[in-house]
Image (spheres, grey):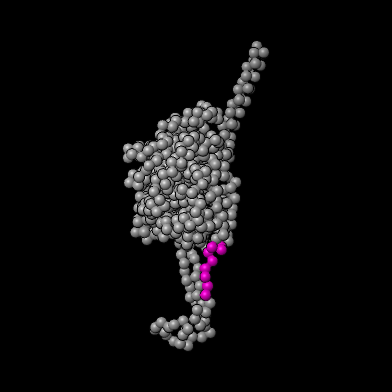
Amino acid sequence: MPGRRCAMGARLDRRKATNDLLAGFTWMLPRMVRTLQPEIRSATTRWGFLFKMGTPRTNGQPGRSQMTAKLKPFALHHFINGKKVAGQSSRTGDVYNPATGEVAKHAPFANADEVRSAIGAAADAFADWSQTPPAQRAQVMFAYRDLVKANIQELAEIVSSEHGKTIEDAKGSITRGVEVVEFACGIPQLLKGEHAQTVATNVDSYSIRQPVGVCAGITPFNFPAMVPMWMFPVAIACGNSFVLKPSEKDPSCSLRMAELMKEAGLPDGVLNVVIGDKEAVDTLLSDPRVAAVSFVGSTPVGEHIYRTGCAHGKRVQALCGAKNHMVVMPDADMDQVTDAVMGSAYGSAGERCMAISVVVAVGSDTADELINRLAPRVRGLKIGPYTDESAEMGPLVTPEHQRKVRNYVDIGVAEGADLVVDGRELLVEGHENGAFLGGCLFDHVKSEMKIYQEEIFGPVLSVVRADDYAQAVRLVNDHEYGNGAAIFTRDGDCARDFTTRINIGMVGVNVPIPVPVAYHSFGGWKRSLFGDHYIHGPEGVRFYTRMKTITSRWPSGIKDGAVFHFKAGGEH
């Protein structure tokens, strides 16, 4: 039947057209994915944190609507010689979404051969980069600075999704890192040497600073953008090449910053990023091609890095643990003190080496008033995921670290300290498996207690009561750590005496977190620092360069013959 044949033919034609369309789409899809890969990566980073949770409530407050799908963890990579390199080792580490407690990514742990490959790329790149004029190196830093500022939202979301800190806190830390990049942009001025003409007859003497070679940086989890930018911009601007080993807990920001450095015009191999654990660190410390090592992290690890690196002939700067004290005098402005303590003790969930973890209140009346002011503020902290714009504090970095900090609170209670505010049982609705811990406040803490002696690295504040100013100074000076300290007072004589007598590397007067600006240098005393150089600022330039002194003579004629003994300068 003609009508039936026509209908059948039409169906066949439509089927053929559909198959042709599907075939074309199948051919185009991989090409579309490759083209959109940067956008897909950004979207995954930005919104992958949200997949799962229904509509959560933060501390009982309604949260924003969130998606219900769950992303499968994906593998990260290394960045070697300007390229993404898949991990070859069978060992990996888990990168968590701190707000959900779930594994979001798998970090490949580089084996020794992979680390040596990165060192080799850096060594090869050093030959040309070290001879690049400083003004040209500065242009790369200017371009990198602009790229970081243009991509700060993306970088902040990467940091927050892996570390847990709020977006505003992440942006603030990136901005502090950018300030070091801006300092490095002035490298032509910073590398100027000294010159002395006619130190003897027809003899001139001058000094220059030259790069040391391949440098390595080993950075902590708490500031995955800022601390790497304390290191590699200064080192690279000085003419060195660099191998960065970021924390395996939140390495993605370092990988993205390396991509931005390449986009800024940095030659391949000058900056490399390898993810790893102790095997990667020990390879960096033992390889003879690595000339200098920078470290920020805990004191036990820092001491190992310092001793091992020095034993292998490297220069090492190791910035380590802290137990930062704030001394509050009876005449202090208590409104100002309360605000300062809240921000410095509980900001970034206490996971920073300059956090105030001990308040030394001078006099019982001072301590009582401070506790009465702090307790309701600590209880009222707004705690939630970084997607909650009202959150003042996010989760800790991993469930493991949450358990560690909670255990310290248990120890403090067992030791007899008065737990005024207990945040151990905090649950954030919709994020019950997240690594959240509420703010904790101890009173009547004694110097022999473990919670006083050891770095907790969490939202736990100890209040110690001192009878007088002299006892407060002794407490600060007797502690094994010497990173930062502050005093709050209206008495100028007291403040000046404190800054002079205190054995601490960074001191604040009515400033709770005295982190130096980028054109000064950062570092502590005692067991908070191993090595002779602070980080960034002028000390950073000195660490990443070596001085060379040249003495030259261009006489019209030499008539004295051989000289077999020293002469005074005026006799030449």
Q: Position of residue 121 (x, y in %)?
A: 46, 54
Magenta residues span: 188-196
Magenta-colored stretch includes residue 195: yes
View extreme (bottom): residue? 559
- Depth order, front residue of 282/523: 523
Q: Position of residue 376 (x, y in %)?
A: 48, 35
Query: In the displayed structure, would residue 14 be above or below residue 146?
Result: above
Magenta-colored stretch includes residue 339: no
Identified at 50% across, 44% down, the residue is 334
Q: Position of residue 484 (x, y in %)?
A: 44, 52
- Depth order, front residue of 328/4: 328
Identified at 44% across, 82% down, the residue is 568
View extreme (front): residue? 365
Q: Quadrant of residue 437?
A: top left
Q: Quadrant of residue 98?
A: top left
Split into 4 quadrants, where in the image is the N terminus?
A: top right
Q: How many marks?
A: 0
Identified at 48% across, 53% down, the residue is 508
Q: Is residue 377 visible?
A: yes
